[in-house]
Each structure stands twice: as C-alpha cells, then as structure tokens.
Amino acid sequence: MIIHSLLDTDLYKFTMMQVVLHHFPGAQVEYRFKCRNEGIDLVPYIDEIREEIQHLCTLRFRERELDYLRSMRFIKSDFVDFLGLFQMNEKYVSVLPSPKRNGEIEITFRGPWLHTILFEIPVLSIVNEIYFRNTVKLPDYAQGRQRLDEKIGQVVGQSDLAEMRIADYGTRRRFSRLWHEEVLLECKNKLGPHLAGTSNVYFAMKYGMTPLGTMAHEYLQACQALGPRLRDSQTFAFETWAREYRGDLGIALSDVYGMSAFLRDFDLYFCKLFDGARHDSGDPFEWGERLIAHYDNNRVDPRTKTLIFSDALTFPLAIRLYRRFYERTRLAFGVGTNLTNDLGYVPLQIVIKMVRCNGQPVAKLSDTPSKNMCDDEAYLQYLRQVFEIHA
C-alpha cells in the first residue's frame, strides 16, 4: 500500500490540527479535489484510490511516532493523547466520477474539521502515485537522478550561495513514496547544510531531519466562518495562532486575500510578533520587495525576519530569489514538485481545498487567480468587497 504511516504527511497538518482541537473542536467542513491539468482521465483509477483510502483508514499512530511528536516543544501533551486515540474514518470521504463525464473525478471530504484535516496530503499522494504507476510502467529513474544531481550541483560549491537553505515540500505531488525517500536521502548526503529539512514528518523522524511547517490556507479560510466578522478574519486567525503557540511557528501565510490585504492587516504588532511570512502566489520578487518595504515602514529591521518562498519553486528560481534578497533579510526556500516529481513526465497539478466551514462558503483570493477555488460567485464578490480587492 502507498501510505504506511499517519506521519507520512506535512507538519502543518498537525500544527493546524492542534489549533482545531483547542479552539474549534466543533467546526464542520467540506474539502474538494481538483486537477488543474487539462485532459487527464482519472476515472479508471477510482477503485484503486478507494482501496488505498480504505487502507489509510485502518492506520493508527504508533507509540514511537507519538513520542516523536511529543518531543516537539510546540506540540502539547493533550493533543498527542488525542492522536493516540485517533483513526481516520472513510465515512467522511466520497470518491466519484464527475457527472461531466470528462475524465475528472470528485473527491470530497465532509465532516468535523478535527476528523477530516489529515486526509488531504495522503490522499493527494495516493492519487499521484496511482496515476503514475498506471501511466508510466517503466519509470526513467536514471533521468530523475541526473536531473536531481544537476539541481544539487547548482547550489553546492557556489561561494555566493553558502548560506542558502532549501527544504523539501514535495509530499503531496511526489512521483511515489519510494522516489520521495530516495530524493530526500540524496539531498541529505549531497546538499549537506544547504538542506534545511522536510515538511514530511515521517521522513524527518526516520532520518533525523528538521520537520518544517506552520499554517496552510485552510486555516485562514476556516476563520472566515469562525471569526467574529469577515473583515477581521485574517487578524483573528493570526491572533488565535499566536495564543496557541506563544512565539513558536511564527511564519504567517500571506496570500489568502492577496498581498495588499495581508499588508493592511499585518500591522506593527504582527510585524514584531511573527518571525516572517511565506509566499505562495503572485510574483515572488514583487512580494519580497513589498514585504521588506513594509517592515522598513513599520520600523522593523527586515534582516531579523524570514521570508519563505514556496510557490512552484525550481532551483534556478530559488537561486535568483536568493541573490536578489540575500543580506537584506533571512531566507528559506521550500521546493515541492520540482524536487520530488521531476523524472521527465508532466506532473499532476492536483489540490484539495476547503470550500465550506460551518455551512458557509470559504475561499482564498490569491495573487494567482487560477489558484482560487470557490463555486459561490456571490460570496467571492462579497469577499473582494470586504477586503478591497479589485480584480
């Protein structure tokens, strides 16, 4: 089977799940799957996907996995105790062919946020691996290894890149679990100190790497329904996060309503409170310049803050960004698909996004319009009006 451990997911799923347990245990949500590639027929693989999800729902956290989570200073003991009892339930999952009969499939999770939050990453990994093992019978691993060596060679030994740090963010769109593991080990052996860590908690535990992650879009989206009023939902999300982690995990996600709305809310208080921000849509160079200027305008030294870039990064793009912003701020780079699914085949651009919380629509209005995912146009218009987004 594809997923062998419930730790085979991104760290931010656990950090968000802890917030859900402590602050929003009764929230009800809905997630939906989308493949952004044109002409991909996933319908023939529905039975395989269902079988893998059934297996996923038999897994439990092992004691050594719980001990590993407990060793993280920001993970609280009651949350680990809850995970010790936790098991995914397939009654919350639906996998069906699209009524459009165009090869698309509809994967939906509906139920308590606390009991559905962990489905996203393993299910995306399952869809990816099933698709590629059916469409690529004899993978060209030699090509993949050559491409990986070329990437590593662009960083290692370059004197001006001595401080550059790259992390693996590639769990959800990896070619396969075994290939992901090989790539990580190769990076650990050859990138050396340039490898900051991995978002994958299982591999971090297994190989003594640093697990990385804070919050994802779903957290800020859910706060649209859970906060006191829509206009304050972004500040409500950041304040709730800060109350939970008391200075740990201080990287804010900036693109749920676009950069302009983020900067309006990310005032002097948040500039000082959070360690930095993560870029996930729009022009990364413009984003970096605007955030550094924002820190300067708030009399906060940007050299004390961290800018994390994670949107469709390649090694050449990460290097260009590093050279632009080095010595002006702290930097980190999260590389996903380009690291764990680059063997010469077109990768799937698949996502699972939260679309409803407590019965009302939720959405993100990022600086990359194609990333938006909401079928309620009236709500999107209202969101744009409330956050003064002119598109």
Image (cartoon, rainbow, N blue to C red):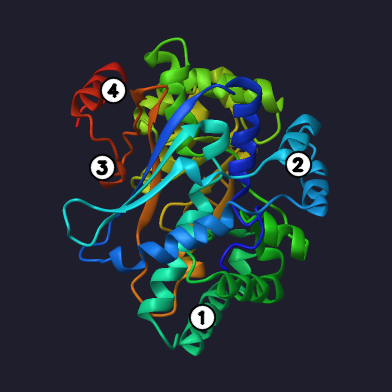
Element under label 4? helix
Give the foreground label among 3 and 2.
Answer: 2
| Above or below: residue 56 compared with residue 79 | below
Q: What is the spatial separation of the Cα atoms under label 2 and label 1, in whole angstroms?
A: 42 Å
Which residue in the structure is indicated by mark 2? 84
Q: Are marks 3 and 1 in contact (CB under 8 Å)?
A: no
Q: Earlier in the sequence, mark 3 or mark 2?
A: 2
Give the foreground label among 2 and 1.
Answer: 2
**Corner quadrant of residue 368:** top left
Which three-letter amino acid code belongs to the residue tagged 1? Answer: Glu
Give the percent coordinates (x, y) of residue 10: 59, 50
Q: Earlier in the sequence, mark 3 or mark 1?
A: 1
Circle 2 residues within 10 Å: few <14, some 14–19, many ≥20: some
**Corner quadrant of residue 372:** top left
- Is residue 159 visible in the rendered structure shown here? yes
Front residue of 203/304: it is: 203
Which residue in the structure is indicated by mark 1? 150
Which residue in the structure is indicated by mark 3? 369
